[in-house]
């Protein structure tokens, strides 16, 4: 599904060139649940931005579902983003001025989905995430866990093939965090490819594979050790 | 459509969520749009709307123009010349003549002087307007004896006759003679464009009017033939003028005919001033736009996270720009609606301030054209104020949505630069307006300090017209005025009284120049003879007016027709026409160009009076004793009082009625009011431009304040760190002040340069002040610098008070 070849990203600074990512080679198959880990400043979020087609200033080759992203213009890349990718942010990033239902509607409206269809998709999703009762509330009327639930719902509503999650449970307490991770696991079983960035070993255990970054390099890339995996899920 | 509605709903919610921002933005735009709408409604009615006549573009006004003397204003024509024009011209379907007159309407109630127009019978047909009641004049009604019929204006019919539907056929007593009412014109009909005209009577020439071709007193309006152009008409009329010059050289040599579209004549000199005002309000609107744009930029900076998230969720740049434009569009819509309300109110204010004689003021209103203009202004505003911020904000990198704490990101350099550019633009535009207002203020101040040549304090003016059918000869007219002066002089509260053909600054009366010669001087042989302003005055006039007598004496009751002819001249006359070093009191002047005219001795020299306005250069003048010359049937009384002059108005009226109960008093006003009216145009322009400049400065100051406050709020943490690291509070204060000062200085530089280019358009409205007056430019720059510093000082003080611990924790 994803092939990165020799991806690098650097900033020009007065002290010279500072690399954030260096010669990243990475292949991710459809249906995988990949965790990116590493210390602060290792380049995790940058890598996620590049994967999510939000960052265009890099070198190397990037193939997404057969599209050679590195040859595409930003506009075309934005189209791919709309077509295949859903995002979950650490800060939830729900839009304050919109209700839960309207927040869910946003990605659909950006994809020019007809109104009727949007309404039914929003209704289905509210139902599926069991937040029908909250549909007219505004984000600041929800708890952190509820907000992130809406965040995930918003990420999947347009039926993306790939979900990118940046510290999705970073701002949640552990019970809420587990709930969100279970949700990702379910989505993954239903066929959605998931890439998450996390510091948490516990969250990493939900995935199949851990990519460790350090100073912009891939330090290791290995299947998740099954031993510590939580029961159930 | 659906998504636009969604954008609209979201925008409305965003605006409601920040009522402070919304209120300020809407108010700024409302002021800008309101001022523009109000001024545009004046411009629309005065300059753009066609005249309310049939095919108004074919209506022309014909003048006689003296070409021998440069810069002479065009003049009306004589009855005889008009008849020649009518007989000889082919490029006009019709020509009609008209002349101002006045009739004393007596009968029911107090006698009243009604402004009347004597007009050719075909005038109404030529204009293409039918009376609302009754009929127009018939050609044969121009014949003397059949001419005693009258058509009323709608206003007079309503006011004086209660809109009586049976008015037709009724007989009115005008100047003591019966006139039958044959028609009433429709409401809103005005010809000429003058509030004071209440009646029209057929033009039947009086014997003296046909006598001289030099008596140029008839205005001529013509309807251009369907196949004729203005140029053809002008050529033809010039040819006719050439023929007349050969036929009647004494009256027509050196004269041409000027054909001018009626519209131009009506609009007159109002156009440049109105265009300046329109330009000024456009500046106010631009400043309001810049103000709102900088507010939107600051808002967009606060919303970078939201915009980045939307973009990460798949919003295209177009969608983002559209959503932001919908928001600024909504602000502009609200601003436009509020502006329209302000315009209704502002228009009343403008009309209240408008000088008498503002053309077509009766049709000034907020109509479809004006609404269209407001809508356009609001739409343009939405784009102007919204586009740059929207384009800038939509550039937000979506990846920043992933960064931690990205909702507190500082905005990019692009947004900051744009916001600073807005401030510079606001300051520059306000400087231009301030300089314009400053120049007008300096002019007005200079003008107010001009010595008019008389003392206007505690003076009452009253104009009296004696109808010539009841006062047919000089003796009766002189007797009337002698008796009236005597009666008014004895009123309690009156210290002195005098009479003159025209008071200074007074639009009513008789004011013209007269050829003369001073025997023994080279000019006495000149052809044409020199001319000087001619006034007829009574004894006591100079003392009453406070016009200083520099040499000799004024008139007395002994200067009668059987006494030697005497005149009083003014200073300018002495300087211009008497031999240098001669004693004026030993000179005499022959008035008129007839070789048989008698010589009159100069008995006094008086100071110059600015008769035609404070800004008018004093002209050479001579005064003659009213008992010694042909009386014009009209004099204006000047009454000096010990108390409020208007308190004596009724008493003066009663003295007139005591002498002649059928005689109206046409004009009763204080001299102060007449002087004030004479500068009403200037006061009007000054008030409006001043108000716009004040508005501009308030908007610019709030713009500077807003931007600096915003910067301080954004830099709170940085300032806290600096203070924690040892920066002194004075240094912080200076740094923030410096930022405001730099922007203001840059704006001022652009503004002063712009003002240098633009104030030239004000030249015609200035009085003894150069359009590049350094004092005004310097003063304005200083005022604006002070305002800019104050506007930055308030947020700077806040910055200097930042508690470093609070600032550092706030992240």
Image (tube, rainbow, N blue to C red):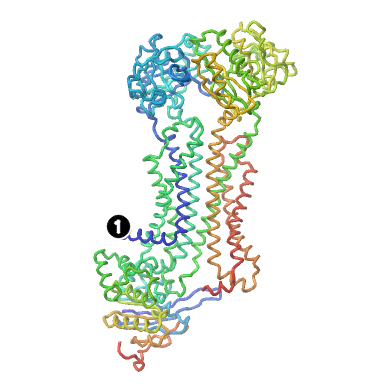
Badge 1 crowding class, 10 Å Cα cut-off, few under 14, some 14 to 19, many 20 or more, is few
Residue B552 percent coordinates (x, y): 72, 16
Quarter holding the N terminus of chain B is bottom left
Q: Residue furthest front?
A: B492
Lateral position of residue B534 relative to residue A135, left or right = right
Of all chains, the one bearing label 1 is: B
Residue B722 percent coordinates (x, y): 61, 71
**Near-viewer residue (B659 or A221):** B659
Residue B485 percent coordinates (x, y): 61, 16
**Near-viewer residue (B742 or B153):** B153
Examine the rendered structure and indicate whether residue A60 appears above or below residue B593. Answer: below
Q: Quadrant of residue A66?
A: bottom left
- SS category of the residue bearing label 1: loop
Examine the rendered structure and indicate whether residue B762 appears above or below residue B334. Answer: above
Examine the rendered structure and indicate whether residue B384 appears above or below residue B466. Answer: below
- Residue bearing the label numbered 1: B1
Examine the rendered structure and indicate whether residue B744 appears above or below residue B566. Answer: below
Number of dots carrying numbers: 1
Q: Is residue B27 visible?
A: yes
**Near-viewer residue (B598 or A96):** A96
Residue at 56% x, 76% y is: A15
Residue B368 percent coordinates (x, y): 36, 40
Lateral position of residue B551 relative to residue B415, left or right = right
Q: Is residue B534 visible?
A: no
Residue at 25% x, 72% y is: A124
């Amino acid at each position: 599904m994803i092939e990165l070849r020799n991806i690098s990203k650097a900033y020009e600074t007065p002290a010279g060139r500072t690399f954030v990512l260096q010669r990243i080679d990475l292949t991710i198959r459809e249906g995988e649940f990949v965790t990116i880990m590493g210390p602060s400043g290792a380049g995790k979020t940058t890598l996620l931005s590049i994967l999510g087609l939000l960052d265009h200033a890099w070198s190397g080759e990037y193939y997404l579902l057969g599209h050679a992203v590195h040859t595409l213009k930003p506009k075309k890349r934005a189209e791919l983003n709309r077509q295949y990718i859903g995002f979950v942010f650490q800060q939830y990033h729900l839009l304050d001025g919109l209700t839960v239902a309207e927040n869910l509607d946003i990605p659909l409206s950006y994809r020019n989905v007809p109104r009727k269809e949007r309404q039914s998709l929003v209704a289905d999703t509210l139902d599926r995430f069991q937040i029908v009762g909250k549909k007219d509330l505004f984000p600041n009327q929800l708890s952190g866990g509820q907000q992130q639930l809406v965040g995930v719902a918003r990420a999947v509503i347009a039926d993306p093939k790939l979900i990118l999650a940046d510290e999705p449970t970073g701002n949640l307490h552990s019970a809420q965090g587990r709930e969100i991770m279970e949700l990702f696991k379910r989505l993954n079983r239903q066929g959605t490819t998931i890439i998450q960035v996390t510091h948490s070993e516990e969250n990493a255990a939900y995935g199949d594979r851990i990519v460790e970054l350090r100073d912009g390099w891939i330090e290791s890339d290995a299947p998740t050790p099954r031993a510590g995996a939580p029961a159930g899920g | 459509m659906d998504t636009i509605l969604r954008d609209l709903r979201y925008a409305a919610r965003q605006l409601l969520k920040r009522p402070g921002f919304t209120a300020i933005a809407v108010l700024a735009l409302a002021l800008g749009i309101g001022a523009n709408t109000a001024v545009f409604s004046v411009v629309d009615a005065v300059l753009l709307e066609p005249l309310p006549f049939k095919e108004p573009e074919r209506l022309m006004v014909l003048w006689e123009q003296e070409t021998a003397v440069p810069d002479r204003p065009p003049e009306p024509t004589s009855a005889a010349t008009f008849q020649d024009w009518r007989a000889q011209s082919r490029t006009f379907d019709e020509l009609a003549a008209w002349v101002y007159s006045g009739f004393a309407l007596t009968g029911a109630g107090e006698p009243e002087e009604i402004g009347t127009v004597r007009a050719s019978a075909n005038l109404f047909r030529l204009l293409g307007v039918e009376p609302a009641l009754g009929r127009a004049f018939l050609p044969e009604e121009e014949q003397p004896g059949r001419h005693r019929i009258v058509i009323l204006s709608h206003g007079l019919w309503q006011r004086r006759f209660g809109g009586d539907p049976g008015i037709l056929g009724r007989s009115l007593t005008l100047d003591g003679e019966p006139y039958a009412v044959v028609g009433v014109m429709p409401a809103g009909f005005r010809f000429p464009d003058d509030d004071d005209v209440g009646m029209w009577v057929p033009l039947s020439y009086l014997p003296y009017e046909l006598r001289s071709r030099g008596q140029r007193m008839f205005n001529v309006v013509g309807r251009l033939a369907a196949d004729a152009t203005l140029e053809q008409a002008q050529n033809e009329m010039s040819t006719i003028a050439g023929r007349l010059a050969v036929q009647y050289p004494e009256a027509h040599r050196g004269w041409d005919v000027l054909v001018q579209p009626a519209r131009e004549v009506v609009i007159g000199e109002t156009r440049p001033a109105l265009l300046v005002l329109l330009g000024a309000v456009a500046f106010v609107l631009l400043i309001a736009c810049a103000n709102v744009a900088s507010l939107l930029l600051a808002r967009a900076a606060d919303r970078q996270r939201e915009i980045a998230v939307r973009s990460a969720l798949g919003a295209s740049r177009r969608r983002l720009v559209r959503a932001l434009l919908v928001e600024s569009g909504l602000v502009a819509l609200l601003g436009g609606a509020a502006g329209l309300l302000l315009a209704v109110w502002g228009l009343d204010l403008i009309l209240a301030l408008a000088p008498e004689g503002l053309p077509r003021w009766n049709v000034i209103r907020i109509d479809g054209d004006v609404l269209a203009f407001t809508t356009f202004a609001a739409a343009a505003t939405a784009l102007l104020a919204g586009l740059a911020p929207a384009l800038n904000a939509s550039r937000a990198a979506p990846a920043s949505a992933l960064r931690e704490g990205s909702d507190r990101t500082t905005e990019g350099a692009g947004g900051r630069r744009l916001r600073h550019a807005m401030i510079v633009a606001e300051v520059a535009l306000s400087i231009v307006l301030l300089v314009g207002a400053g120049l007008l203020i300096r002019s007005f101040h200079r003008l107010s300090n001009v010595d008019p040549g008389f003392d206007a304090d505690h003076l009452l003016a009253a104009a009296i017209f004696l109808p010539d059918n009841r006062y047919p000869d000089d003796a009766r007219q002189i007797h009337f005025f002698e008796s009236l002066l005597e009666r008014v002089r004895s009123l309690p509260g009156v210290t002195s009284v005098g009479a003159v053909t025209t008071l200074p600054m007074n639009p009513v009366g008789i004011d013209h120049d007269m050829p003369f010669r001073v025997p023994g001087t080279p000019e006495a042989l000149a052809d044409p003879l020199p001319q000087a302003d001619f006034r007829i005055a009574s004894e006591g006039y100079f003392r009453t007016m406070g016009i200083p007598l520099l040499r000799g004496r004024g008139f007395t009751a002994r200067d009668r027709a059987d006494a030697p002819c005497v005149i009083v001249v003014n200073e300018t006359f002495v300087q211009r026409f008497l031999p240098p070093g001669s004693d004026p009191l030993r000179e005499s002047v022959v008035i008129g160009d007839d070789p048989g005219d008698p010589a009159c001795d100069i008995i006094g020299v008086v100071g110059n009076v600015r008769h035609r306005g404070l800004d008018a250069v004093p002209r050479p003048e001579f005064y003659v004793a009213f008992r010694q010359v042909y009386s014009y049937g009209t004099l204006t009384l000047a009454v000096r009082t010990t108390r409020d002059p208007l308190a004596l108005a009724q008493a003066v009226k009663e003295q007139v009625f005591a002498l002649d109960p059928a005689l109206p008093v046409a004009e009763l006003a204080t001299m102060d009011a007449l002087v004030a009216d004479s500068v009403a145009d200037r006061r009007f322009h000054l008030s409006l431009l001043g108000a716009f400049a004040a508005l501009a400065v308030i908007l610019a100051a709030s713009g500077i304040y807003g931007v600096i406050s915003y910067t301080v709020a954004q830099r709170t943490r940085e300032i806290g760190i600096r203070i924690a690291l040892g920066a002194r509070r004075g240094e912080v204060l200076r740094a923030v002040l410096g930022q405001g000062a730099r922007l203001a200085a840059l704006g001022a530089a652009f503004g002063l340069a712009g003002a240098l280019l633009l104030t030239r358009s004000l030249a015609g409205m200035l009085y003894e002040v150069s359009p590049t007056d350094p004092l005004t430019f310097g003063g304005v720059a200083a005022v604006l610098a002070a305002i800019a510093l104050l506007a930055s000082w308030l947020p700077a003080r806040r910055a200097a008070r930042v508690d470093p611990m609070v600032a550092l924790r706030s992240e």
